[in-house]
């Protein structure tokens, strides 16, 4: 088995003259729950559509569970469950018909599990999909994706627009499955706190580019915003990692750093740059800051 | 798994078009029986009956290709419409090669012509039996049914190509416009193309052309 469930090299896709995806190099470890973060319009859904062979004219290399895309797409899809951003099932089906139809395409379909989960979700077999509420449709989508017993789940904003109760139901079904099967999950969302609870890897997209990719622990650990009185030199040998820096015009600099620990203030004293303020950031703050800094870097470039 | 995929595909398509299919079956039954209209009048003699049935057979002959054409086109649109609504996201993420799933869809769509053709054949046989015609007039329910199946399949294939052409659909009206323009300029390309498509025995639309007679001499 490959160490990477998803790998892209230089994944690029243009719509007209503009880049929708620009040299995206994804590395999703096998067995990881990988949160694919980014603001609306960052290119998350486009990336997912490229991974699943739904886009034409894609440049770069895509590998899903060791299968080249699009050459070995059916073999990859046989091992992959997919929940799109917008429900893609045929609206004239009933729940029973949707289950029967979907199961016919998946050799590993677990009918007993699907039936028990359907009952747990309270989905009536004779309900037409057109008449399902958004929450019921969300439950059905995750049920179909999980009942095919995939090794990889690709979920595009699976809980977007769902109420907290349904969201909890959907996420707990997902977590149970991952615990049981050790499946890889690639889940996109702009709801940072939702992913914080379940993900162990994070990728951050912005404006068609992969801005950051790292384990969740590292993403969260000791990220601080520092307000400095002066302009210290480039911090070679610093005890922390400088993620980004921004000149605040005559008032020194702001730094975004990772791996911060108490006592590191002394390093600034040694550099002769007064450290005026240290602000701890939660995941959402880190997300927003990284985006802000990435955009600042791009404008500067 | 192939057989199961075909069965669920056929069932899904059948449910989607069931009301229209029922209507097509009714029309397929009505057309041959309508050929016999007025035959029971006591003043109609044996030879008059033959003339009457031949005349009515010719009058109604246009109904069969129209039914085949409408049914084929409708089934083609209905086969792909749910995917167009969902922007192909579902069907293209099913773990089957795209060529195979297209083939399964087409075979399932053409299979749905069978109940209508069967109804036509049974009604044609029934009409031939009750017509009580002189030997000089013969009924052709089998040939008519085969022609109906071929015409429906051709219409289905053409409809599918048009639907699947997607954004490239503009090519068809542009090509027709160009041919008509050349025709008005004195180059008989349009009529040659129509002849090749409909009248030549190997033309793809040949099954839809010609006389569709249930009764003939």
Image (cartoon, coloured by chain):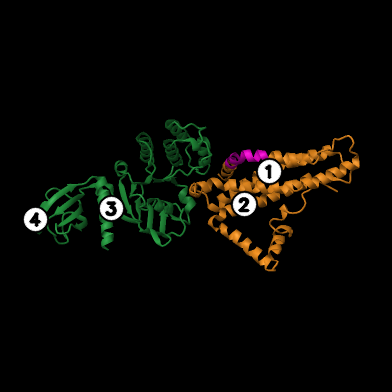
Look at the picture and state if A231 lies above or below B125.
Answer: below
Q: In the visual, does A123 lie left or right of A283? A: right
Is disc 4 on the same chain as disc 2?
A: no
Name the magenta segment's main secondary structure.
helix
Write down the quadrant of residue A250 in the picture: bottom left
Part of the protein shown in magenta: B11-23
Q: What mark, if any, has residue A291 been given in the picture?
A: 3
| Residue position for label 4 | A269
Q: In the visual, does A51 lie left or right of B105? A: left
Is disc 1 on the same chain as disc 4?
A: no
Q: Return the chain for callout 1.
A: B
For the N terminus of chain B, which image quadrant? top right
Residue A182 is covered by the magenta coloring: no
> In percent of the image, x 46 and y 40: which residue is there?
A144
Q: Observer-nearest residue: A62 or A83?
A: A83
Q: What mark, if any, has residue B114 been given in the picture?
A: 1
């Amino acid at each position: 088995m490959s160490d990477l469930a998803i790998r892209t090299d230089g994944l690029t896709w243009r719509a007209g003259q503009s880049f929708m995806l620009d040299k995206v190099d994804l590395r999703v470890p096998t067995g990881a729950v990988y949160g694919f973060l980014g603001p609306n319009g960052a290119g998350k859904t486009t990336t997912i559509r490229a991974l699943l062979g739904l886009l034409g004219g894609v440049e770069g290399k895509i590998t899903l569970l060791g299968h080249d895309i699009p050459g070995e797409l059916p073999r990859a899809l046989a091992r992959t469950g997919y929940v799109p951003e917008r429900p893609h099932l045929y609206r004239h089906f009933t729940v029973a018909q949707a289950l029967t139809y979907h199961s016919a395409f998946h050799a590993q379909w677990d009918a007993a599990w699907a039936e028990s989960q359907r009952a747990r979700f309270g989905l009536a077999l004779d309900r037409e999909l057109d008449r399902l509420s958004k929450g019921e449709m969300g439950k059905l989508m995750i049920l179909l994706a999980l009942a095919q017993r995939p090794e990889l789940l690709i979920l595009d904003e699976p809980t977007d627009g769902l109420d907290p109760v349904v969201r909890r139901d959907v996420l707990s079904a997902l977590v149970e499955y991952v615990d049981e099967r050790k499946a890889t999950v690639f889940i996109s969302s702009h709801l940072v706190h939702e992913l914080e609870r379940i993900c162990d890897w994070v990728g951050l997209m912005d404006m068609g580019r992969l801005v950051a990719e790292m384990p969740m622990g590292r993403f969260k650990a000791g990220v601080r915003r520092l307000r400095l009185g002066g302009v210290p030199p480039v911090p070679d040998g610093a005890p922390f990692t400088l993620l980004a820096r921004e000149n605040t015009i005559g008032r020194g600099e702001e730094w975004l750093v990772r791996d911060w620990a108490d006592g590191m203030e002394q390093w600034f004293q040694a550099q002769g740059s007064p450290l005026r303020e240290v602000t701890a950031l939660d995941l959402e703050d880190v997300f927003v800051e990284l985006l802000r800094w990435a955009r600042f870097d791009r404008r500067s470039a | 798994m192939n057989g199961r995929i075909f069965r669920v595909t056929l069932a899904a398509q059948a449910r989607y078009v069931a009301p229209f299919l029922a209507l097509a079956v009714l029309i397929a039954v009505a057309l041959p029986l309508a050929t016999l209209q007025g035959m029971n009048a006591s003043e109609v003699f044996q030879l008059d009956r033959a003339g009457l049935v031949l005349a009515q057979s010719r009058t109604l002959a246009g109904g069969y290709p129209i039914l085949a054409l409408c049914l084929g086109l409708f089934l083609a649109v209905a086969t792909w419409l749910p995917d167009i609504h969902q922007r192909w996201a579902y069907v293209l993420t099913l773990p089957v090669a795209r060529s195979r799933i297209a083939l399964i869809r087409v075979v399932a769509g053409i299979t749905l012509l069978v109940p209508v053709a069967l109804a036509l054949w049974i009604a044609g046989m029934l009409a031939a039996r009750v017509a009580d015609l002189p030997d000089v007039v013969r009924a052709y329910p089998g040939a008519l049914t085969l022609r109906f199946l071929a015409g429906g399949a051709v219409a289905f294939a053409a409809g599918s190509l048009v639907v699947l052409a997607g954004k490239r659909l503009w090519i068809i009206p542009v090509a027709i416009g160009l041919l008509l323009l050349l025709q008005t300029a004195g180059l008989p390309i349009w009529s040659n193309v129509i002849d090749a498509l409909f009248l030549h025995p190997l033309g793809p639309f040949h099954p839809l052309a010609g006389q569709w007679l249930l009764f003939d001499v």
